Image: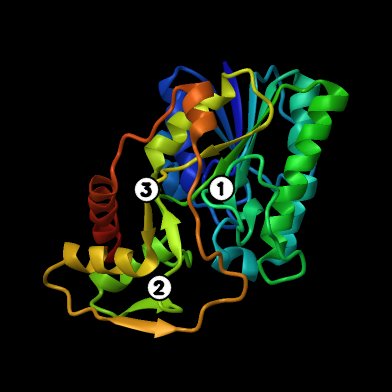
Amino acid sequence: MRTVITGGAGFVGSHLCERFLAEGDEVVCVDNLLTGHRRNIVHVLSNPRFHFIEHNISEPLQVDGPVDNVLHFASPASPADYLAHPIPTLKVGSLGTHNALGLAKAKEARFLLASTSEVYGDPEVHPQREDYWGHVNPIGPRGCYDEAKRFAEAITMAYHRYHGVRTRIVRIFNTYGPRMRLNDGRVLPAFMSQVLRGEPLTVFGQGEQTRSFCYVTDLVDGIYRLLHADFSEPVNIGNPSEITVLELAKEIIAMVPETKSTIVYKDLPQDDPKRRRPDITRAQTLLGWNPTIDRAEGLQRTLEYFRSVVER
């Protein structure tokens, strides 16, 4: 099999490249390195079945030869990134998705879109099911990401219905693990970098907002299963174990007994979701998928990775 992965030098994308190589595929990794990095793929560059193309998928892409799968994971994904790059975020969700779908159509390949729990916005339904349409502010600061992904889902379904492309949509909930960037603005790497440096952990609001964290290898396994399933509608992939941000801060501080970190509170950002937890019934039923890495184990693995990064 020959698999094209856009955003393949990013956090999740690089783990996907590893998985498809492990499955015996030839992998074509496409990334413009806006938020991805070569260090995420340096260990596979010598693999003869791995090919890297530095390219912005918001521009048309030509790939010679047959292609069996196209996975579209190119996009800034953290608030710090998409707030810094709102127009490229909108472009990669619209033009980039269009180009990736066009490649899949031309090659008669399966297509999988990386969507997000952010399509649910600040949800009024809890936990979030795939049939919930969301509560999103289209003109707020987060709208560039939320609406880019909602449009990406819409055009993906249009290609499925009108052109018959074999499409899949994964709605990804908070994911963590090695190769996250310390400065990407998401809560978990922020807490870990702060605790390892002995700095105060920044909690927004009173820390009562909740998140559900899925370890990256569990996510990748769910994505792989979804790609090979015959199902075109969105599927949530995430860990339904819910925790408040304040509880997470305390857990991470407890993991580093020598730290001098305390907790400080700042104002809650606009449109920050108050609750986030996936209903994974569809993934369980269709894919036979469940997360296997509990938070204690996943956090320890991730802390070891961040410790090595901080100490470089």
| Mark drawn on residue 207 | 2
Residue extending farthest to the left is: 258
The amino acid marked with disc number 2 is Gly
Mark 2 to mark 3: distance in Å? Answer: 17 Å
Circles 3 and 1: CB distance less than 8 Å? Answer: no
Q: Say if 45 sits above or below 92 in the image.
A: above
Q: Which residue is mark 1?
A: 128
Tell me the kind of residue under disc 3.
Answer: Ser
Q: Is residue 268 left or right of residue 231?
A: left
Q: Nearer the viewer, residue 39 or 98?
A: 98
Q: Mark number for residue 94?
A: none
**What secondary structure is found at the residue carrying circle 3?**
loop
Q: Is residue 175 above or below residue 207?
A: above
What is the C-alpha distance between the residues marked 3 and 1?
13 Å
Residue at the location (30% across, 66% down)? 247
Mark 3 vs 1, N-terminal side: 1
Q: On the image, which quarter does residue 273 sit in?
A: bottom right
Counting from the top left corner in percent of width and height, residue 78 is at: 54, 60
Residue at horizontal 25 percent and vertical 64 percent from the top: 252
237 to 120, vertically: above or below: above
| Element at label 1 | loop
Spatial CA span between label 2 and label 1: 20 Å
Is residue 223 at least partly visible in the picture?
no
Residue positioned 58% across, 50% down in the render? 117
Residue 18 image point, x, y percent: 43, 32
**Where's residue 235, x and y in %?**
59, 34
Q: Is residue 237 left or right of residue 72?
A: left
Q: Position of residue 244 (x, y in %)?
A: 38, 64
Residue appearing at x 72%, y 23% in the figure: 64
